[in-house]
Amino acid sequence: MRAAIEAADNVYHTVQGTFPEAVADFESKWIAFQAVCHSLLASASPRECTRTDEFETLRKQGLKILAFVVFKLATDVDQNSHGAFLFNALVNDPKYRGVPDDDLTSKEALQRYSGQIVELSVQLNKVYEERVKLWKEYCETYQAALCRNICCCGDEYWDLLEVGPAFIPQLMVEYAGDRGGYWYELIHEIVHGRTTEAHAIFDRPKWEDGPYAMGTSKTVG
């Protein structure tokens, strides 16, 4: 579990380093959500926290907060296990979300399931990192003739597309640091199923704009 915590921590702080305002905004919303969850009566079902405005506010942030939610589940599952409900509201694919061992009506079941989410996320993050590495190497091989028809094709590109929208936050960081590449096109195709077909992309990387906003209120799967 230590490796899972370190991996989640690394992703969180990498995104925070590039988009500090976005992380601060998430944290303020998360604190409000947690306050509601922990104010529930002891006899109440943990699911009651999903019927609140605070939960809905976070859910509407969409896929771009997935890395933050995993970080919360990894670093303090005792206090943050309600985040599993939020993760489930955003993710449909079993390979990302796993399968809970019951209907999550107890704190213990919620904590076990949170651990499952973290482990799956770490495993998938390893796959993502390997595929990003291979795609970068592929593009560098053809750097002299770099164009969309080369970089946005080939097995390396298609394999990276398959990691899906759960990794949009990490791809956003890549794009912010390398605007000469085709990160924008990759993100756009993950979200929309096609590239932009634009001859040039001029907008600056912003958390709330561009292809990133298209991760809002979407789900994986």
Image: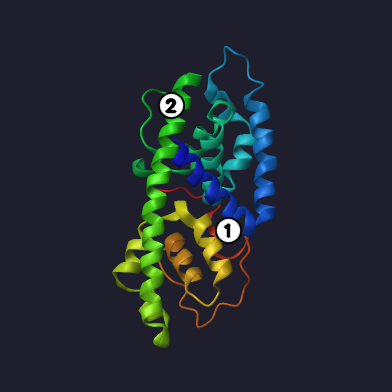
The residue lying at 39 percent from left, 43 percent from top is 96
The residue lying at 56 percent from left, 77 percent from top is 201
Residue 54, quarter of picture: top right
- Quarter of the image that includes the N terminus: top left
Give the amino acid type for the residue marked by disc 2 in the picture: Arg
Q: Position of residue 175 (x, y in %)?
A: 54, 67
The residue lying at 38 percent from left, 49 percent from top is 124
> Which residue is identified by label 1?
213
Is 57 above or below relative to 18?
above
Q: Position of residue 157 (x, y in %)?
A: 35, 68
Q: Nearer the viewer, mark 2 or mark 1?
A: 2
Q: Are marks 2 and 1 in contact (CB under 8 Å)?
A: no
> Which residue is identified by label 2?
112
The reply, left or right, for residue 131 in relation to residue 213 is left
Residue extending furthest top? 43
Dot 2 or dot 1: first in sequence order is 2
What colouring does the structure picture have? rainbow
